[in-house]
Amino acid sequence: MISLSPDELIPGISFIFRSRKNCKNCKCLREGHEIVAEHGARSRLGLTSNHDGLDARSLGYTFVPAGLTTARQVDQYFSSLPTHEVPKLGSKGESARLQRIVKQLPKQDLALTACKFVEESVKSSYQDFVSARNEIALDIGLAKPAPPNSSCDGCKRSIPNQQVSVVAPRMGKLIWHPGCFRCTTCQDLLVDLAYCVHDDKIYCERHYAELLKPRCEGCDEVSHDFETRPIRRSKNEKF
C-alpha cells in the first residue's frame, strides 16, 4: 500500500492536508474518495475474479491483465507501455494506477449507496441506468497474442504476429496495442482494461456516463433528473 503526495493526486480533486484532509469540492473526508484502491478495477466494479493464475505482486506489479499465462508475456505487455504507466510496486506507475481507478471508476457511478444526492424519486432511474450499462456497455479487456495480419484500432498501425495485445469482448475482433487502449474522451490509459462502449468507441466509465448524463462539478455525481440518451450495443459485439 502506498500513499500519494499532493502532486500525485487526481486532477480536479484538491485536498487540504494540514487540517481534516477534506475535499475542497464536496467537503467529505479524503478517505471517502478511496485514494488507495488496493483491490483493483474488477473488485471495484463488483465483478468476480477472472485470473489465469499469475500473481501480480510476485512478479513485481500491482496488476496483471487477464489472459496472460507466463511471466515473459507479462514483461512483454508492460514493456510496450511508457515507464510512468507501468504499475510496478512502489513506482510512480503504481500511483498513476490508483489515481486512474478513482478517476475513471467513480464509486458514485457504480453503487447507489455511494451517492449522497440522489433523490428518492429518481433512484429507480439510477438503477435502470446502472443495469443497462452493465448489460450493454461495461466490460474488462483481455491480453492475448495477436493473430497474423493484425492492426491496432487505436493507432491503425500493424501489430506483429503473436505480440501481446489487448482485445475487448464487446468490440468483437478489434485489437489494440496495450498503450493504445485508451478512453476516447480523456485519452487516459484504461485502468485494468476496464472499459465501456458507446457508438463503437471505448471510454472509461466516467466519460461514458457523461455522454449520457450531466455530471455535477460540485458533488461529482451524474444527474438522473434528465432523460438518458439511448444506450446502444456495439455493432462489433457478437451475440
Image (cartoon, rainbow, N blue to C red):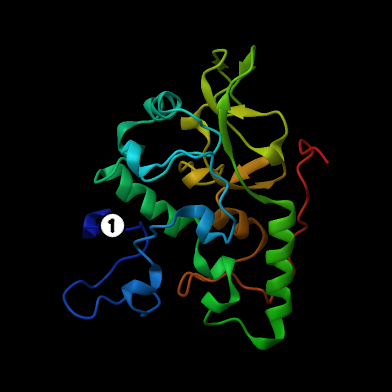
Residue to which mark 1 is pinned: 1
Q: Position of residue 166 (x, y in %)?
A: 56, 31
Based on the displayed image, in which of its 4 quarters is residue 127 positioned? bottom right
Above or below residue 159? Residue 63 is below
Q: Position of residue 88 (x, y in %)?
A: 31, 40
| Rendered residue at 74%/52% (across/down) | 136
In which quadrant will I find the C terminus? top right
Above or below residue 122? Residue 67 is above
The answer to whether one can see residue 215 in this image is no
86 and 8: which is toward the camera? 86
192 and 174: which is toward the camera? 192
Amino acid type at image mark 1: Met
Q: Position of residue 221 (x, y in %)?
A: 54, 71
24 left or right, relative to 120:
left
Based on the displayed image, in which of its 4 quarters is residue 237 positioned? top right
In which quadrant will I find the N terminus? bottom left
226 and 172: which is toward the camera? 172
